[in-house]
Amino acid sequence: PAPAVPWTPREFEAAARARLAPEHYDYFAGGAGDEVTVRANEAAFGRLSLVPRVLRGAGRPRTDVTLPGGRAAMPVLVAPTAFHRLADPEGERATARAAAAAGTVMIVSMASTVAVGEVAAAAPEATLWFQLYVQPDMAFTETLVRRAEAAGCRALVVTVDSPARGLRDRERRHGFWDLPEGMACENLRDGGRVRPIVMSPEISWEHIDLLREMTTLPIILKGVAHPADARLALGHGVSGLLVSNHGGRQLDTVPAAVDLLPEIVAAVGGAVPVLMDGGVRRGTDVLKAMALGAGAVAVGRPVIWGLAADGERGVTRVLDLLRSEVEQALTLCGCASVHDLDPGMVRRSCR
Ligand code: FNR
């Protein structure tokens, strides 16, 4: 049962589930295949321990971070997730206002149900980045990039873990293929029609090079999992990487995102910031990822649960909880800022 008042980011899930149609709850919660990776993302944080430092006189910690697409007041960004109007009538407008209030970045999904320009108009103070699936029709990809630029987005987050759609049994079981009447992927309007998103196995590094020539916006590749790809990315003009397994929704049995992080950080060698998402539910999770070298983390489902539970206010609450948890955990670790974290403060425990 849903608790009367959700007190933790995780508790918002029960409140959201009570309000969502079952097929929409399953769309948001579910993942690929046996959902091994969905479970692994959260479980991996549970196997990591934090070893605090003491007596450092660090004072009240700062939680802000500087990123390729600007500064954020907290190291927890809003990951790109599709279809926010399934969770709340205001959809991505509500999410953007909450992100602006928290002083953090919202990565607007290409599959948003409010056009990116309208998201920006609804939350002029928000720092927005735009998530892009490169479309094989590069002329249309350029249209999308121009829409993101016109909306004032400060970075492009190019999702590269989706040459095809993941195997989603929960969606198949419900027959959930389409948005309800009156909702659409508004960024994909092309004349009188709305294009479907093409997930194409033809996309390659050449497309990243074309994109690099197309825009001056920083490009962050999302979904790099293998250190060899992290090294390759450095030769293609990217400004950052976002280590992610898409919240376990693409290839099942990919390792937990936080377990992929150290090798990618080592491969990149400080050349560009490395962000991560997947399974972040507590301030202590944020510290673990950042101690292992992440420049920031992002949260997907917790934001959706806040939105479905209580609209803009719910997202504000989830982000506020995470920010204050990060601050408290930094204090308890003897850190004046996230820069005081280092890999020596994280241990792998068997549990
Ligand atoms: C996603 N994710 C995602 N990623 C992306 O690049 N474009 C998208 O449109 C979406 N859509 C989407 C919908 C839903 C319902 C979920 C749950 C996720 C993946 C997302 O950006 C992120 O990688 C994960 O959500 C992170 O894991 P957690 O925080 O949900 O555990």
Image (tube, helix red, strand yellow):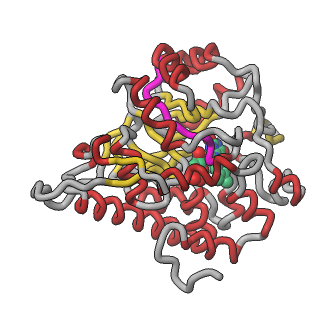
For this orientation, the residue located farthest to the bottom is 4
* Left or right: residue 25 compared with residue 158: right
Pick the front one: 120 or 268? 268
Give the x, y percent position of residue 351: 49, 57
Nearest to the observer: residue 262 or residue 216: 262
> Could you tell me which residue is drawn at 69 percent across and 58 percent down?
28
Decide: is 238 above or below 172: above
Relative placement, left or right, of 145 versus 287 is: right
Which part of the image, by quadrant, shows the N terminus? bottom right
Image check: 333 left or right of 171? left
- Indicate the position of residue 25 as horizontal and vertical percent values: 72, 64
Badge count: 0
Residue 143 screen position, x and y as percent: 66, 29
Q: Nearer the viewer, residue 213 or 243?
A: 243
Asked if residue 169 lies in the magenta stretch, the reply is no
| Residue 267 image point, x, y percent | 43, 23
- Residue 116 appears anywhere in the view: no
Q: Residue at x 14, y 60 (%)?
A: 59
Residue 99 seen in the figure? yes
Instruction: Say above or below: 104 vs 269.
Output: below
Magenta residue span: 237-247
Closest to the observer: 258 or 67? Answer: 258
| Residue at left offset 59%, top offset 30% | 145
Residue drawn where x is 63% and y is 64% of the image: 90
